[in-house]
Image: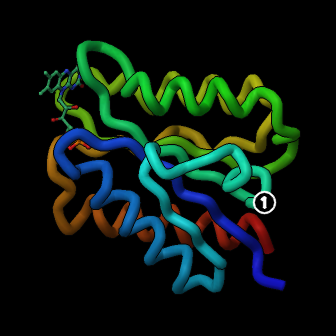
Amino acid sequence: MEKKLAIIYGTGFGNTGIMARAIEEGAKNAGLDVITKKIDEASSSDVEKADAIAIGLATYKGAGMPTVIKYVESLAKIPLKDKIGTAFGSYGWSGEGPIAVTNMLKGYGMNVIEPSLRIKRIPEEEGIEECKQLGKKIAQMLK
Ligand SMILES: Cc1cc2nc3c(=O)[nH]c(=O)nc-3n(C[C@H](O)[C@H](O)[C@H](O)COP(=O)(O)O)c2cc1C
């Protein structure tokens, strides 16, 4: 059966959403079964069923979006050890969000891809390609 990737993301203005869709494209092209959800549609069962998770969040006021941080906190009750995890997000100048989530995923014992993929403001061609490559990398790690 195809391995599953869950991409869960929060975005204020859509930039992190552009990243999520490019990661999805890269992962699908590399043969993964991908589910992509905005944070307000996501539940912990999305992650439970997945072999890998990619958590996206923009940074506002020196921190990751609180809705996403709370969601990742809620994953503490799920067995995540040895699943693949990574964090990504658009930012303006400091980009704390993906770093915070990376540390949380490591705390859960996940096999975490580092550094997190952070793109300044609106992802352009090069950034979109990096996102696609991240999707491909996750697929290769699951093989
Ligand atoms: C009110 C406000 C506060 C922000 N605070 C930060 C910040 O503390 N650090 C940072 O790196 N970027 C900050 N940004 C920039 C956003 O992270 C950036 O615009 C990003 O592209 C938004 O991504 P999104 O479209 O996925 O929401 C801030 C933007 C706004 C509007």
- Residue placed at 41% from the left, 27% from the top? 97
Ligand 1, seen in the image, is in the quarter at top left
User: In the depicted view, which residue is nearer to us: 89 or 114?
Assistant: 89
Residue count near mark 1 (Cα–Cα under 10 Å), binned few <14, some 14–19, many ≥20: few
Question: Cβ of disc 1 within 8 Å of ligand 1?
Answer: no
Which quadrant holds the C terminus? bottom right
Residue 136: % across, % down: 56, 72
Q: Secondary structure at mark 1?
A: loop
- Residue placed at 84% from the left, 85% from the top? 1
- Residue placed at 28% from the left, 60% from the top? 18
Q: Is residue 98 left or right of residue 91?
A: right
Q: Is residue 25 above or below residue 38?
A: below
Please identify the residue farthest to the top as the structure is shown. 62
Residue 27: % across, % down: 55, 74
Residue 63: % across, % down: 36, 17
Question: For the residue marked with disc 1, what is the amino acid?
Answer: Lys
Q: Quadrant of residue 117?
A: top left
Q: Is residue 7 above or below residue 31?
A: above
- Residue placed at 58% from the left, 40% from the top? 114
User: In the depicted view, which residue is nearer to us: 32 or 133?
Assistant: 32
Q: How many marks?
A: 1
Residue 103: % across, % down: 62, 24
Residue beneath disc 1 = 49
